[in-house]
Image: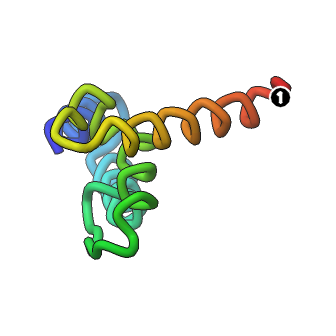
């Protein structure tokens, strides 16, 4: 949330009319509400997907998973690496 707050402040402090900044902030907040870490329903069955979403969106870092099992951390790291390789066209 701190990151989002800084981004919103930068947006509001930037150039453009007050109206343009207002509507851009409204659009960004609506978009951000759909992203993990802002609004998320947590359940045990969705835990891995939720953690992947939080990691992918930069809401949390892998260092913040220290309380989880090594097996889960390795699994998430593998999926993230594969996802990033796929996004960059690496094989």
Q: Quadrant of the C terminus?
A: top right
In percent of width and height, residue 34 lies at 40, 66
Tell me which residue sits at (58%, 41%) in the image.
79
Tell me where residue 14 appears, x and y as whole percent: 30, 29
Above or below for 91 versus 72: above
* Location of residue 51 in the rendering, given as x and y in whole percent from the top left corner: 36, 52
The answer to whether residue 87 shows anywhere in this view is: yes
Side of 7 where 77 appears, left or right: right
The number of numbered badges drawn on the structure is 1
Tell me the quarter of the picture where residue 3 sits: top left
Question: Where 74 sits versus 36, above or below?
Answer: above
- Nearest the camera: 34 or 43? 43
The secondary structure type at the circle numbered 1 is loop
**Left or right, 50 with reference to 59:** right
Identify the residue at horizontal 20%, vertical 33% (top origin). 66
Residue 38: image x %, image y %?
25, 59
Bin the neighbour count of mark 1 within 10 Å (Cα to Cα): few under 14, some 14-19, many 20 and up: few
Q: Which residue is tagged 1?
A: 89
User: Toward the viewer: 19 or 47?
Assistant: 47
């Amino acid at each position: 949330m701190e990151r989002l707050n800084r981004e919103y402040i930068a947006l509001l402090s930037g150039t453009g009319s007050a109206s343009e900044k207002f509507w851009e902030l409204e659009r960004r907040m609506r978009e951000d509400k759909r992203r993990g870490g802002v609004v998320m329903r947590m359940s045990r069955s969705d835990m891995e997907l939720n953690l992947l979403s939080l990691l992918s969106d930069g809401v949390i870092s892998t260092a913040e998973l220290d309380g989880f099992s090594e097996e889960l951390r390795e699994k998430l790291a593998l999926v993230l690496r594969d996802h990033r390789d796929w996004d960059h066209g690496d094989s």
